[in-house]
Amino acid sequence: MQSHEVDYEIFGDDMQIVEISLDPGETIVAEAGAMNYMEEGITFEALMGDGSQPNAGILGKLLGAGKRVLTGESIFMTHFTNQGRQKSRVSFAAPYPGKIIPYDLAQHGGELLCQKDAFLCAAKGTEVGIALTRRLGTGFFGGEGFILQRLRGDGMVFLHAGGTVVEKELHGETLRVDTGCIVAFSPGIEYDIQAAGGLKSMFFGGEGLFLATLRGTGKVMLQSLPFSRLADRVLQHAPRAGGSRKGEGSILGSIGDLLDGDG
């Protein structure tokens, strides 16, 4: 294997963490700010790139950093390495309610396409790149823009998805999905955007103007609660953003906010 072979255990239900066990010399690569805790012997370093091409020059590293800027992520990734003499553990937490998905690239063709913010961490040796959507309509209306993340390698990767995760196996079939509910899919799946229906359904049906169409043979992972949907609902009911107050029934209302420091 080119990727480091790591062991893991997932804890929790709707606010999960994944605990990675590293043998001496092994490394896990994660998005900046994802670490929850680490044991003695683990050291970390912010590096430009995923470390899958250690012999890449300055130009190659800058190119990789530029690709990460396009996905909206930090140009640096954090590398956690076990520098001790015995196995040690480091854990990574999900950024919002949902599930952590372990995915073994070696058992699924060595490649996976995922939405831009789904990647959590991966064994060192995994290439974290980008994939440009081929159709103009997909880029403008697909909910994920022109760019998806492409994960390549033969090790373990860990994704995060909001709410409940549903995995579908397509065998030449077609699946129509809300554009924000796609987490990841294998390279054998063709991704396109189509109108949701007639004009009345598009504007008054509440399902948006466009739906994603997934067609082909391979695996599709879907999420029940995209972060954008969760954020929209929170902002909708935030009083300071013009939403309606959803209190706990206190007769003090906003006066209570002043007393407890929220005002």
Image (cartoon, rainbow, N blue to C red):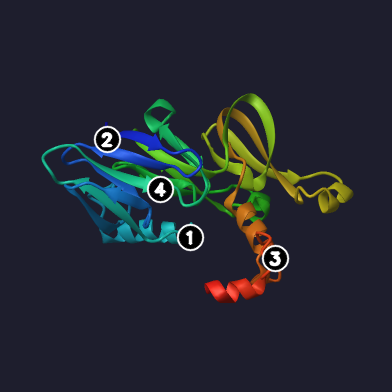
Looking at the rendered structure, the secondary structure element under dot 2 is: loop
Q: Which of the two discs, 1 and 4, labels the residue nearer the N terminus?
A: 1
Residue at 62 percent across and 53 percent down: it is 230
Q: SS class of the residue under badge 4?
A: strand
Other residues around mark 3 within 10 Å, as few (<14) / some (14–19) / many (≥20): few
Horizontal and vertical percent position of residue 73: 44, 59
Using the rendered image of the protein, determine whether residue 209 is visible from the camera's viewpoint: yes
Q: Is 242 rendered above or below residue 27?
A: below
Q: Amino acid at mark 2?
A: Gln
Residue at 59% from the left image edge and 72% from the top image edge:
257
Q: Which residue is mark 1?
A: 72
Q: Which label sits in the foreground, 1 or 4?
A: 4
Q: How far apart are the two marked residues, 4 and 3, measured between alpha carbons?
A: 30 Å
Give the labeled residue for mark 4: 93
- In primary-sequence order, the first of circles 1 and 3 is 1
Quarter of the figure that contains the C terminus: bottom right
Q: Which residue position is annotated with label 3?
A: 245
Task: From the top left corner, tell me how far across and down residue 17 is, in percent.
Answer: 40, 43
> Picture coordinates of residue 4 (x, y %)?
26, 37
Could you say which is closer to the camera, residue 194 or residue 22?
Answer: 22
Q: Which residue is mark 2?
A: 2
**Circle 3 — which element?**
loop
Earlier sequence position, callout 1 versus callout 2:
2
**Number of marks:** 4
Viewer-nearest residue: 23 or 96 = 96
Chain-order first, disc 4 or disc 2: 2
Apparent side of residue 41 relative to residue 156 in the rendered image (left or right): left
Q: Mark 1 near mark 2, Cβ–Cβ under 8 Å?
A: no
Tag nearer the camera, 3 or 2: 3
> Secondary structure beneath disc 1?
loop
